[in-house]
Amino acid sequence: MLSSLFPHRKFIRLDGGMGSMLQKGGMPVGALPEVYNITEPERIIDAQKQFVAVGSDIIYANTFGANSHKLEGTGYSPDEIITAAVHAAKKAVSGAKKHAYVALDIGPIGELLEPYGTLTFEEAYEIYKEMILSGVAAGADLIVFETMTDLYEVKAGVLAAKENCSLPVFVTMTFEVSGRTFTGCSVDAMACTLEGLGVDALGINCSLGPDEIFPIAQRLAESTALPLIVKANAGLPD
């Protein structure tokens, strides 16, 4: 399915960090970037236009935390935020000299699943299903799960995507220097599970800089024949 979007392409360029762009523009610490899709959409569109201008093939919609758990108390529903975000990203890529696709960007729910937390698998599935249906209705071209640490939560998300839409699905997890995620998932376990679930591409994002992430990416390349995604930090936080 990925080849239908990018026939005969060996490398696909993703975008940069939306949160970093908004923070540079003065977004206060603790603010929810997703609300800006409605309150200040031009700031989102401007950032995404910059990503397209420097060669991004895929733009992540500003929907990383647009789930019912994280939006509780904001006065906005996931559907409102996601619809506005996808429309903003579509506006950013329209008219550009280079065509770019728009991904529905989905991050962790923000509540650990059982047995680490209290969220059930079924509840996680429904939260992700709500996001995916909104993203599909708004016109997203693909689904991306990123910055994931719990393979069980990833499974809930991927199943929600596979069972409720026909879009390509990408997944990236966040690993520590040890080669495992915060909840102990190994590179090999990730590759085996996600291949079985039928994702279109998988990889690593966040937490580590290019030097630290490289050996983990090499290990992943040895564990799967699927297209690999690497989205390292520009450096490590101080």
Image: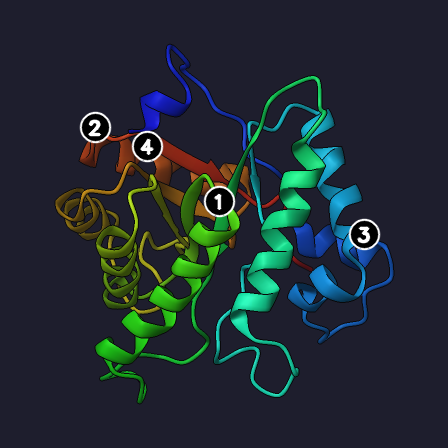
Badge 3 amino acid: Arg
Name the quadrant containing residue 170: top left
In the image, farthest residue toward the right: 26
Q: Name the residue beneath numbered marker 2.
A: 225
Judged from the image, the secondary structure of the residue bearing numbered disc 1 is: loop
Nearer the camera: disc 2 or disc 1: 1
Which of pointers 1 and 4 lies earlier in the amino acid sequence?
Answer: 1
Q: Label 1 vs label 4: CA separation?
A: 30 Å
Quadrant of the rendering where the N terminus is positioned: top left
What residue is rendered at 51% in x and 55% in y? 207
Judged from the image, the secondary structure of the residue bearing numbered disc 2 is: loop
Q: Label 4 vs label 3: CA separation?
A: 36 Å
What residue is rendered at 21% in x and 28% in y? 225
Q: Nearer the viewer, residue 83 or 26?
A: 83
Q: Relative to 169, does residue 11 appear above or below in the rendering?
A: above
Query: Residue 32 at what x, y percent from top left?
Result: 68, 71
Left or right: where does residue 9 sit relative to residue 151?
A: right
Badge 4 amino acid: Gln
Which of pointers 4 and 3 lies earlier in the amino acid sequence?
Answer: 3
Which of pointers 2 and 3 lies earlier in the amino acid sequence?
Answer: 3
Name the quadrant containing residue 85: bottom right
Q: Name the residue beneath numbered marker 1.
A: 140
Nearer the camera: disc 4 or disc 3: 3
| Mark 3 surroundings within 10 Å by alpha-carbon count, few (fewer than 14), some (14 through 19), many (20 or more) | some
Name the quadrant containing residue 195: top left
Q: Name the residue beneath numbered marker 3.
A: 43
Badge 2 amino acid: Ala
